[in-house]
């Protein structure tokens, strides 16, 4: 387990993304090989906690994953949840809203996918796109996206008040790392399918996205739904940090198995 305190954005403070080291391996004595080994017991702990959450069926966990393109959202989900029973874990990706979704308020499609009792929902992108890409591309007026910070804080408070633990993770990569990952997608045949020419356009807007992330994270990290900024240039360290954050959150929820039924005298013929 890593000490996750450095990655918490304390509510009411600035995220200060530019000052955070995306290549950090703070608190871990070792490299990639050791890191991958160290993840295995964390996978098992997560699996055990998820079983308890599911068995208890009273609380729910929402994990929000945001990152710049190539930030590693998919890879994180794959490696951190390895060995976790897929039943009870749902992953939802949020792309550009369709016509029907656009005909509603921006939280409408989000709220429908929040987890049920005993469940874990992972949002691969989320309502944060509505203050990120929407802002950067000018899809609604500034007045409209700006008031969304308050909506979002209150929406997440509603979820928390009603029994959902909300954990928000920003996978923080550098611009240089993104270049390398995009180049790898071009170069390596098994990664080429992931290459999207539109990502190059978004890359040109790196600074604008950085400003948008900085403000979104700073304005919406709250006691009831904190943001963590995870150093994500090194995938193995990112996975350790994310697993540690999720274990901490689940330990705090402390799900317990329901009382055993009275099986005195029960015989299987
Ligand atoms: P990913 O890049 O996460 O693997 P996609 O390639 O399907 O997934 O990209 C989803 C796209 O949808 C992203 O470019 C994202 O910015 C966009 N998107 C998500 N939510 C919204 C939104 N509310 N408004 C506009 N675009 C959005």
Image (cartoon, rainbow, N blue to C red):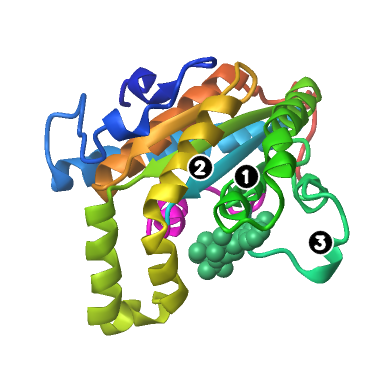
Q: Which residue is under mark 2? A: 212
Q: In this view of the protein, which residue sits in the foreground, 139 or 7?
A: 139
Q: Does the residue labelled 2 lie within 8 Å of ligand 1?
A: no
Kindly identify the residue that appears in the image at 37 percent across and 18 percent down.
5
At label 1, counting other C-alpha atoms closer than 10 Å, the crowd grade (few under 14, some 14-19, many 20 or more) is: many
Callouts 3 and 1 close, C-beta under 8 Å: no
Which mark sits nearer the N-terminus, 3 or 1? 3
Quarter assignment of residue 159: top right
At label 3, counting other C-alpha atoms closer than 10 Å, the crowd grade (few under 14, some 14-19, many 20 or more) is: few
Q: Is residue 44 found inside the magenta-colored segment of the image? A: no
Taking the view exactly as shown, the residue that stands out farthest to the left is: 30
Is 266 left or right of 39, judged from the image as shown?
right
Q: Is mark 1 on a helix, strand or loop?
A: helix
Q: Which residue is under mark 3? A: 102
Q: Does the residue labelled 1 lie within 8 Å of ligand 1?
A: no
Residue extent of the magenta highlight: 69-90
- How many angstroms separate mark 3 from mark 1 (CA)? 15 Å
Callouts 2 and 1 close, C-beta under 8 Å: yes
Quarter assignment of residue 158: top right
Q: Is mark 2 on a helix, strand or loop?
A: helix
What number is the disc on residue 31?
none
Q: Which residue is under mark 1? A: 131
- How many angstroms separate mark 3 from mark 2 (CA)? 21 Å
Q: In this view of the protein, which residue sits in the foreground, 261 or 204?
A: 204
Q: Residue 140's spot in the image, x, y percent?
A: 71, 53
At label 2, counting other C-alpha atoms closer than 10 Å, the crowd grade (few under 14, some 14-19, many 20 or more) is: many
Which mark sits nearer the N-terminus, 2 or 1? 1
């Amino acid at each position: 387990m890593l000490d996750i305190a450095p990655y918490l954005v304390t509510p009411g403070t600035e995220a200060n993304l530019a000052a955070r080291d995306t290549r950090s391996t703070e608190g871990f004595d070792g490299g990639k090989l050791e890191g991958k080994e160290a993840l295995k017991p964390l996978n098992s702990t997560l699996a055990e906690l998820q079983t308890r959450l599911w068995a208890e069926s009273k609380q729910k966990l929402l994990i929000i994953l945001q990152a710049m393109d190539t930030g590693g959202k998919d890879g994180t989900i794959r490696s951190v949840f390895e060995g976790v029973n897929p039943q009870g874990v749902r992953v939802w990706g949020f792309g550009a809203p369709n016509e029907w979704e656009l005909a509603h308020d921006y939280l409408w499609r989000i709220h429908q996918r929040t987890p049920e009792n005993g469940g874990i929902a992972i949002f691969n992108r989320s309502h944060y796109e509505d203050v990120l890409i929407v802002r950067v591309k000018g899809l609604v007026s500034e007045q409209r996206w700006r008031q969304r910070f308050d909506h979002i804080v209150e929406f997440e408070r509603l979820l928390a008040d009603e029994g959902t633990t909300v954990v928000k993770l920003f996978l923080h990569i550098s611009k240089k790392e993104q270049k390398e990952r995009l180049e790898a997608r071009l170069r390596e045949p098994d990664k080429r399918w992931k290459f999207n020419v539109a990502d190059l356009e978004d890359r040109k807007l790196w600074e604008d996205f950085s400003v948008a992330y900085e403000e979104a994270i700073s304005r919406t990290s709250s006691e009831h739904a904190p943001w963590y900024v995870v150093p994500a240039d090194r995938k193995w360290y990112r996975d350790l940090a994310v697993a540690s954050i999720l274990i901490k959150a689940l330990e705090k929820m402390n799900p317990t198995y329901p009382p055993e039924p009275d099986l005195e005298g029960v015989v299987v013929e």
